[in-house]
Image (cartoon, rainbow, N blue to C red):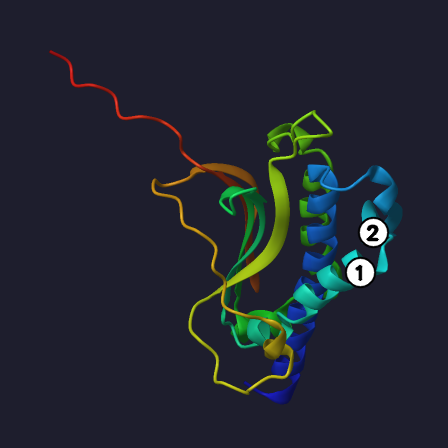
């Protein structure tokens, strides 16, 4: 890979990280985890999106997304998940971004083309409220106690190879006993970026008795 291709690959990775920061904010807003007043409308890629108004919330999302940059540049990130937990720390809903960047073809894409493709994800997110599991209506009983951003890596990075990587710690997220129920939201299969967004919910189905 020559220097120009390396620079283009880095630009694609930075665009993806910036997109993820906006998309994660939209997901948290869409979920209704915080009051609507916690967000403000902004334009990004010519789409109306949500931006966190509270500095700590905004900084957390920014740090989580920007901390992925060195791993995405190296092709280590397989999935990025926004996970919502119940009061007993069990995942109840996951928004999954599956990411693949072909660094060898990064120099062939125009920035406008990439932004046009990512814009379609933001538009789809803005109208996806019907796909989201609603929060409890009671203001006294909230089953969702916390949420987090989790990255799943194809391989472990070298220890101390990135200061940004020090922001990330191994997750103790519990695993579901059965394969999750998957709801596709949006997908992009193009060069240099392949991106899928889908929802995962726990499978509560019970095995059916055998016919007599």
Is 210 left or right of 63, judged from the image as shown?
left
Instruction: Look at 57% across and 65% down and name the residue there.
Output: 192
Query: For the residue labelled by badge 1, is the local secondary structure a helix, a strand or a loop?
Result: helix
1 or 2: mark nearer the eye: 1
* Residue 189 visible here: no
Seen in the picture, residue 210 relative to 99 is either above or below; the reply is above
Numbered circles on residues, count = 2
The residue sitting at 47% across, 59% down in the picture is 172
Residue 76 point in image, percent of width and height: 49, 71
* Residue under numbered circle 2: 51
Snapshot quadrant of residue 208: top left
Give residue 123's quadrant in the image.
Answer: top right
- Nearer to me, 25 or 33: 33
Residue 75 vs residue 141, the one in the foreground: 141
Which class describes the residues within 10 Å of circle 1: few (<14), some (14-19), or many (20+)? Answer: few
Left or right of 190, for residue 57: right
The numbered mark at residue 143 is: none
Classify mark 2: helix, strand or loop.
strand
Q: N-terminal of the two: label 1 or label 2?
A: 2
Residue 155 higher or lower than 150, as above or below: below
The extreme top residue here reads 212
Tell whether 130 sits left or right of 207: right
Residue designated by label 1: 56
The residue sitting at the left extreme is 212
109 or 17: nearer the viewer: 17
Q: Quadrant of the N terminus?
A: bottom right
Q: Residue at x 73, y 37 (%)?
A: 32
Residue 202 drawn at (x, y percent) = 44, 37
Q: Is residue 149 visible?
A: yes
């Amino acid at each position: 890979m020559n220097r120009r291709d390396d620079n283009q690959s880095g630009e694609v990775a930075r665009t993806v990280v910036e997109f993820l920061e906006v998309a994660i904010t939209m997901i948290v807003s869409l979920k209704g985890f915080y009051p609507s007043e916690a967000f403000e409308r902004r334009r990004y890629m010519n789409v109306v999106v949500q931006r966190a108004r509270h500095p700590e919330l905004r900084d957390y999302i920014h740090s989580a997304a920007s901390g992925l940059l060195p791993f995405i540049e190296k092709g280590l990130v397989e999935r990025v998940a926004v996970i919502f937990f119940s009061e007993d720390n069990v995942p109840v809903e996951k928004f999954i971004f599956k990411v693949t960047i072909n660094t060898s073809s990064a120099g062939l894409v125009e920035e406008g083309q990439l932004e046009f493709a990512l814009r379609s994800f933001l538009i789809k997110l803005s109208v996806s409220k019907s796909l989201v599991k609603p929060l409890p209506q009671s203001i006294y009983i909230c089953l969702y106690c916390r949420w987090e951003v989790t990255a799943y890596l194809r391989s472990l990075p070298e220890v101390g190879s990135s200061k940004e990587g020090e922001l990330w710690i191994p997750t103790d997220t519990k695993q579901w006993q059965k394969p999750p129920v998957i709801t596709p939201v949006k997908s992009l299969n193009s060069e240099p970026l392949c991106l899928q967004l889908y929802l995962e919910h726990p499978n509560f189905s019970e095995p059916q008795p055998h016919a007599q």
